Structure formats: structure tokens, C-alpha cells
Image: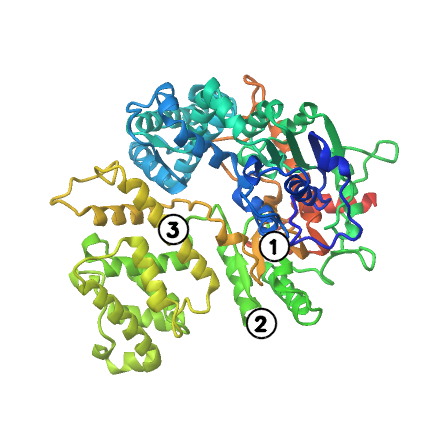
Amino acid sequence: MESPAHSAPRTGFTTDKSVLRAKTLFLSGPFGAGKTTAAIERISWLLRQERVRGDQILVLVPQPSLGQPYHEALHRPDMPAGALVQVATVASLARSSVALYWPLAAPAAGFAEPRKEPTFLNLETTQYHMDGLVENAVQQGEFDAVRLQRGRIVSQVLDNLNKAALHNFTIDEAYARLENTVPAGEQMTARLNVLRSARRISQAFREMCLQESLVDYSLQMQTFLRHILENDWCRTHLFRTFRHLIFDNAEEETFAAQELVRRWLPHLESALILVDEDGGYRAFLGADPQNADRLAGCTENRARLADSHSMAPGLSSMIGGINRAILGRRGDGGQEKRADVDVSGLPDGSPIVFPEGTHRFYPQMIEWAVGEIERLVKQEGVAPKEIAVLAPFVSDAMRFSIQTRLQEKDIRTASHRPSRALNAEPAVRTLLTLAALAHPSWQRRPSRADVTLTLGSAIAQLDPVRASVLAQAVYNDRDNAGAELAAFEGLRGDVQKRVTFAMGERYEQLRVWLADYRAESEFSPLDRFIARIFGEKLSQPGFGFHEWPEAARLADHLARSARNFRWAIGEQGGAASPVSAEPPSAPVPRQVELSRAYVELVESGALGALHVPSWTEADDAVFVAPAYTFLMRNRAVEVQFWLDIGAEGWWQRIHQPLTHPYVLSRNWPQNQQWSDLHEFQSRQESLRRLLLGLLRRARRSVFLGMSDYGEGGMEQRGPLLNLLNRVQVQA
């Protein structure tokens, strides 16, 4: 899908009238061909020419961020007034349906108390309820064979539940498929036992949800697909709610969503299904591009837009070369040329740009990329938001190096890593440490290292050395006095001079604010505390968040997360923690218990739920992210930097021993084993789709950065580099 607001101008682009008037149409094409523009014109035509009410039109997208072009278009002044077109995901449609039809669906779904209102769980609250079950299993050594952090075990077990629901598998069927991925060998028995522990936890979690009327994503989708859509009255009522459908990015949707649309088509007055060719980047989340293509057989008409308006003209030959190299279309009598060539030998004016010289070490590659970005911004006038710096994985060191060097050159950056735990962000750790210092009733004393990080992040221009000196002087983590910060005026004179009185004054303002807050008779909930300290102190001049846009986004994210946790868990009553190592010696106020439970969840490594504003807003900043995250942002840019092209990570899947995105799919035969050949083929196809998706989102050029030795000091000759060599040989 492509947003008109972010795409290159489409000179002479027109929409064929058949696209507007066909009752049911399957429209395919590459990214940037104009499919979303055609869909928006169709909506406008329905509203203006056909006089269709806006609330009878539904736009389905795989994730909320992909609906932004529709929101922007529908709020234009030239759009007809009246009821708004609904832009939704299948998940949001399922949630509203479960809430609406709950009295009919709950008994059939097996909930113990159908009359009790459901509590819908988001990612964070779901992890919270699952965490206790996993913790017990970890303590008993049931997951020793996989050596995963507890948070990763939780996320992979939940992923199995989600995929089972989306593909209409039972829990036992899903884990039977996963057992076929375990290779024979010495570790086979141990790996099978790990999967059986995960199965037991999945079943226990599902039973807990049914007993307490908790509706996580998997149970929400299962209830929607198996009970609401199979109920004649509910299905008829739902299908009559909307008369016109736009199904965008169908290739990024799950089997369940595609089957919902397939069943809905005969009941609609019109439908437009849009598919990006060579898409399906969300395969790890259940995307099924093969089944999306089958929807073409369910529509009366099929059309294709062939030309991309967002890709640099010279990149089409590179796409052809990648397809020939991977899909096996060989020339020269069927013999594929293989050689280790210098891929820097590209013709002048090519949109593919290599450094003039080779980089032996990783930091040299980073310096080259930073220098090129500075040249593009300051000499050629490229806006920072039109530059994306991509890598297979963005480590803390890479992100810090790029952001620090660009900040020195007055170029802003923005970053997003969805698989990164909340507590791994310095801004989040700063806020949680300040919250612990402000709430002595939590009985959670931060470490001195956390206090050092907090002082360095919260006070502007306080470097790490002086932050460490100040933390050692004002904070004692060995006794009860450690719960409170000492006054700056009570420190030794040499310490005050070393920290400087200017930094000491800012520290005192922060310390006094915390002391005044502690003196209040009633404390605020955690989300309100975060909003308050951010607004009253941290965002003010002289403090660390004042000129740190990413910290502001993370503070907003953390406050939203804590608020949703309080609402979801607080509504249930009873204990806030499903598993407690020791019974409390005295009754703990509910608010204290909730806040403490949330902090424990974040510190255990929980992943944060996706909040759309945190990474989709069009900031005037260079975007630094993993390649797949950039594709999910779904926005073309002028210039891309592909760093570390010699790394293996360009085609490797994240290590997930407890789940498998391809085996947990309707496209995979139930009893077939997953072999090394299947793994190789899936990696090749994923690499092809990834590269084509990136190239089609580059309007001007792609800079390729590599170093002989990677970040870890190992020599790099990965599959992407080899593929580029082969493409150049074949050219």
C-alpha cells in the first residue's frame, strides 16, 4: 500500500473507470503503482456519485498504521460531509463483534461465567497473565534446553496460541505440527519436552482465561471465527452492517482475515481487494500471500497496475537480476555464472551506490554512512525524513553510534525496534527509576547503576563520568537511606566542584520535586506520575527530555501502557499478581500493588504493545530501523542506506525454538517434517521479497555499506553480498 501523501507525484496518473465501477475487483501490482490511490478514488466515487453513506463503507487493513492514507484522505476538505468511513483491522472488528455479541458467543465459547463482562487484554496484560505460568516452569527447569529469557518464552508461547486461532488449529494440533520441526539427534528428547511444557502452559493459560472471562488476542479471534461467524444471526447482522468493502494489503493479512472476506464477498454490493506483488513481509505474524492470491478467483474482475511511481527508474534492472538469481531463471545454456567479483564496479549514475574504497572495520562503515548523510542533507538538500538507515538487526551499539554522530552534525534521527523490550530503552529505565525513588511504598530500591543512568538522562549536559560521581555521592543502595537522594549542598566541596554547581542546581530541582511528591498524602497511579514528572520537570529547559524527541515518545508509550494495564488488571479485582513467591505480611493498597506489578512486568523483559504515533509520525528525522520495520512503516523515501550487507542476518530468521511461522500455516502439510532444504528455500524467498520491497521504496538511490569485519569482529561474506555479486555477473 502506498500513501499519496508520501509518494512521488504521479504525473498523468489516472484511474480506469472499471476500477471505480466493477462490483468486485481484485487489483494487484507492485508497491507504488497507485492501488491505494485508486481505492481512495473509489471511496470518493461511492460517496459523491453513488450517494453511499460513509458508515456503509469499510476499509480493512492489516495494522492501524497502514490505514493512515485513508484517514488523511477522508479528512480532506473536499470530501463529502456525513458519516465517516470506518477504517479498521480484522482484530478491531473481531473485538467489537465479541463485545457486541458476547451474550450469544460466551456460552458457546466455553466461558465459565457468560454473564460476566469480558476483560480484553492487550499485549502487555496478556504477557503479565502468562508470566506467572512460565515463571513456575522456568524455576522447575522445564526450559533449560532452549536457554531463552523468560520474556522470550512468554512471547513465543503466545505466538503459538495466536497462530493456532488464526489458522483454526486446536492447541494440540499446533504443537503436533511444531514437533515435526525438531531435528533428530541427541537433543531431540529435550526439545520435545520443552514443546510439551509449552503446550501445557498454553492449555493452562486458555483455561484461566475461560474461568476469569479474560479475552486475549487468540481467544478473541477464536471466539469470533468459530462462534460469531458460525452463528447465523450474528453473521447475518455483521455482514449487513457494511455494504462496500476495501481490503488493502491483503497479502499481509492472515488466513483468518482472508477467509472472512471470502465469505463476506457474496453479501456485498461492491468490494475492492488490493494486493502488493511480492509482499507478505509479515509472514512471522501469520501473513499468507498465497491465500491472498486465491481471492482473485472469488471476484468478478481482475486488474493489474504494472508501473511503480515510487521507485528510481534504474532499480528495475536490479529487481530483474534478483529474480533471475533466486528464482532460477538462468541464461547461457542454463549454467549460472558464479564468481567473487567487486560489486563496486557499477556504472556511473547508477542508483546503487557503493563507497569509493573498502572498509575493513565496522566503525569505518558507520563513519562513511554518517558522512554521506551529512553531504546529502547539507549539500544536496535532501530532507532528513527522506533518508532511511537500515540493517537486518539494529543493535544498541549501531543505533547509538549513528544517532550520536548525526546529532553532532545537527541532524535528527528517529528509531523504532518493535522486538526490543521496554526496559531496554534508557528513557524508560529513567522513568521507572524515578518512579521507584518517588514511591517508597513499592519497596523497590533501584541499583546505583540505574540511578547513574537516570541522572545522566534526566539532567541535560551531565556526562556519564559526572553522573557516576554524583550518584555515588547522593545515593546509598546498601541500607534504608538508599531509598532517598541526598541534598547537593551536603556533599563534600571537591565533589561539588567536580560535578559543577550548574549541574548541582538542576539536580537539586529534580531532588526537591521528588521529595515534595513523596510528602504528599496520596500518590498518583504510575501513568499519571509519568505524565506529571515529564510535564513538570523532565521536559523543561535544562533537563534531559527537553531536546530528546524519542524520550517524549517513549514516555507517552510507557504512560499509555501503564494506564491500559491499570484499567485491565484493576477491573478484575482480587490479587494483582497471579503468582507470588511470598505472601504479603500486611495488606497492600490496590494502587501500590498494581504499580509494583506493572514495574515487575516491564523489568522482566516484556515487549511493548504497538502504539501507532510512536513510529509512524512523519518526523523530519533520519529513520534508523531494521529493514522489516521499515517495510511495515510502508513509506517510500528518497535515499536508503543498507548497512552491514555482508551479515548473515539479512536472510536468517530470529531464533524461535518454541514456534515456527511456516509450519503453523494452512499452506504446510500437517504431517510433513521441516528440513534444512525447506529452511534454505524459505530464506531465499524471504530475502527476495525483502530486497524487492526495499528497492520499490527508494525513489532516488540505495547506498550499500559493508565492512570486512562485522560488529563482533568476524569476517563477513553473507548471502546478500553473494547475491549482489551474482546479480552483477549476470548483468
Placement of the N terminus among the 4 image quadrants: top right
| Residue 462, position as x, y percentages in the image | 39, 73
Q: Is residue 160 left or right of residue 694?
A: left
Where disc 3 sits, the SS reads helix
**Residue appearing at x 39%, y 41% in the figure:** 151
The 10 Å Cα crowd at callout 2, few under 14, some 14 to 19, many 20 or more, is some
Q: Which residue is tagged 3? A: 560
Q: Badge 3: how crowded within 10 Å, few (<14), some, or many (20+)?
A: some
Tell me if 87 is positioned left or right of 278 in this view: left
Q: Earlier in the sequence, mark 3 or mark 2?
A: 2
Quadrant of the image occupied by residue 136: top left
For label 1, the residue is 77
Left or right: 433, with 284 as reference point: left
Residue 242 image point, x, y percent: 55, 32
Residue denoted by label 2: 409
* Amino acid type, residue under disc 3 in the picture: Arg
In the displayed orientation, state which residue is furthest to the left.
Answer: 586
Q: Tell me what residue is drawn at x 38 percent, y 42 percent.
A: 124
Disc 2 to disc 1, how far (Cα)? 39 Å
The answer to whether residue 185 of the structure is visible from this angle is no
Question: What residue is drawn where x is 32% and y is 62%?
Answer: 532
Tell me where residue 704 sits by quadrant.
bottom right
Question: Which callout, 2 or 1, points at the residue further toward the start of the chain?
Answer: 1
> Residue 167, can we see it?
yes
Whole-Å distance between the Cαs marked 3 and 2?
Answer: 33 Å
Viewer-side residue, 106 vs 136: 106
Q: x, y percentage for residue 183?
A: 52, 25
Which amino acid does the dot numbered 1 rest on?
Answer: Pro
Q: Is residue 721 above or below residue 199?
A: below
In the rendered structure, find residue 120 and report the number of the disc placed on it.
Answer: none
